[in-house]
Amino acid sequence: MVANQTKAPTVSAVIQEHIDLLVRPSVGTVHTYQTMLKLHLADIIGHIPVDKLNCRHLTYWIKAMQTKGRSAKTIKNNHGLIFFGDGENEVTFLRSVQGWSPAGWWR
């Protein structure tokens, strides 16, 4: 388990903020995103500070989803919520954290 010894927000906090800041989302979209966060993300990687999140955590999360019997589409959809972006910049999620550096991603 990774303790939050930094001032960086957790994965769950950043995703929740993203959901809260959606512009004119449908009720269904908000409900779907909240469900994805609750069922598939919060308990596995939600507690991790975003500046400590690395590829090993994401690999563990994917394997945990596969072990639960989740489909490739479900995993892809949840991955999209983690790495929400603008179509060109898929790492908007991580760059939303002040001080995050792409160089430190693969630690």
Image (tube, grey):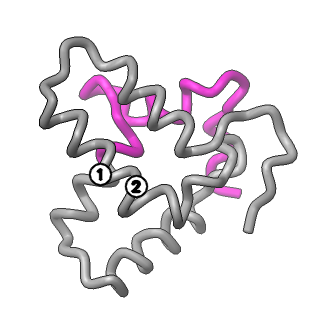
Q: Is residue 3 left or right of residue 51?
A: right
Q: Residue 84 colored magenta? A: yes
In magenta segment, residue 18: no
User: Is 28 situated above or below 48?
Assistant: above
Q: Residue at x 83, y 39 (%)?
A: 6
Question: Where does the magenta region start and end?
Answer: 80-107
User: What residue did someone put label 1 on?
Assistant: 35
User: Could you tell me if the residues under marks 2 and 1 are in contact, i.e. CB atoms within 8 Å?
Assistant: yes
Q: Position of residue 58 (x, y in %)?
A: 50, 63
Q: In the rendering, at what x and y percent does residue 3 appear?
A: 80, 57
Tag 2: residue type?
Lys
Q: Amino acid at mark 1?
A: Thr
Residue 94 image-quadrant placement: top right
Whole-percent x, y for residue 63 in the image: 42, 79
Q: Which quarter of the rendered picture does the C terminus lie within?
A: bottom right
* 69, 83: nearer the viewer: 69
x, y percentage for residue 19?
36, 29
Magenta part, dominant SS: loop
Mark 2 = which residue? 38
